[in-house]
Amino acid sequence: MELNLSPLNLSGIDETKRPLVIAGPCSAETEEQVMNTARQLAQKGIKIFRAGVWKPRTKPGGFEGKGEEALPWLKRVKEETGMLTSTEVATPKHVECALNAGIDLLWIGARTSANPFAMQELADSLKGIDIPVLVKNPVNPDLELWIGALERINGAGVNRLGAIHRGFSSIDQKIYRNAPMWHIPIELHRRCPQLPIFCDPSHIGGRRDLIAPLCQQAMDMGFAGLIVESHCNPDEAWSDAKQQVLPDVLDFILDRLVVRESSELTESLAALRKQIDELDNELMNLLTKRMRVSREIAVYKKEHNMAVVQTGRYSEILEKRGAQGVLCGMDADFIKKIYEAIHEESVRQQTELINK
């Protein structure tokens, strides 16, 4: 299904200027906290305020948001600062309450986008309603599931649609709270080039010190906007305190972003791309030759009743080529992934030939 999209058409905002920034606290905690944060952000030029009203928590017992009680606070933000307001919705009831409160933009969280039944219920509740909706990537790295969630909302007639890249859950505890896996939103952009993609550096990083470099990476990759958690007193935040920044800090980060807008194809770039094309052709020829040799090996294995997979040889290739890649200035994991893919295709072809 091809997405039927139109601009987000946010009142008073130039959507052609990057980044389009949505900012505010993780959670709406008190009216005073919401208004204090909103006033500071408005003074810094932020046009869209975000705050979680309903908070899905991993375990029971955590702060799950103020619910409908907080919606009048967001209405006051709009009346007193002129900012547009946004919040997360996870059920049709949330949608109804948010629309009745005059919320300007809705987003759908990662846990919800992973559930097709929940997405369809939200889509049904949005039929006939003209409001921009942003869909976060599912918690697991599944591009098709993400696109399916977007298609369900679009199929309900919501054309003012965008995506939020918030990273992907991983069992490995590394530097990021959620692994960026940039290749997934890049592929989403390739397949849906008109879809605006926002980066959520707060949820990817999980730490304040990672927000600035993640914002810059998003801009370098051509993302349309950023959705960043900002709190008037982040150390005392009731949820996700470690990943929220002061409005002053957010302003500092945004002020130092380098945004490259030019897409002009110069003669020099065209020449370099031509070299890339020629090298890719050489790579394809070499891979073709390598697979031909693999098939010859398969004939030998069949004649001598040998197993297709020789684990000792496979380990030797991974070890040698990984070390060679490092010496050539490449990442060992990158080389490992390449040779794993080559080995998988080689095994497929050998198995096919042996079983004929």
Image (cartoon, rainbow, N blue to C red):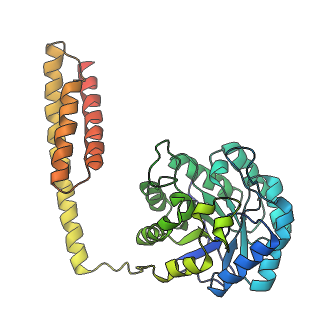
For the C terminus, give its image quadrant: top left
- Across and down, in percent, residue 302 comes to 18, 16
Residue 4 visible, this orientation: no
- Against 59, residue 240 (above or below) is below
Residue drawn at 24 percent across, 33 percent down = 346
Residue drawn at 56 percent across, 76 percent down = 250
Looking at the image, which is closer to me, 117 or 87?
A: 87
- Against 245, residue 254 (above or below) is below
In this image, 167 relative to 71: left or right?
Answer: left
Looking at the image, which is closer to me, 90 or 229?
A: 229
- Across and down, in percent, residue 63 comes to 75, 54
Question: Which residue in the rendered view is the most extreme toward the top?
Answer: 305
- Against 315, residue 304 (above or below) is above
Residue 155 quadrant:
bottom right
Residue 288 visible, this orientation: yes
- Across and down, in percent, residue 284 comes to 20, 49
- Against 49, residue 59 (above or below) is above
- Across and down, in percent, residue 58 comes to 67, 46
Residue 274 quadrant:
bottom left
In this image, 245 relative to 271: left or right?
Answer: right
Looking at the image, which is closer to me, 212 or 280?
A: 212
Question: Which residue in the rendered view is the most extreme toward the front?
Answer: 236
Residue drawn at 52 percent across, 55 percent down = 167
Looking at the image, which is closer to me, 189 or 256?
A: 256
Residue drawn at 62 percent across, 71 percent down = 6
How many marks do you count on the picture? 0
Residue 60 quadrant:
top right
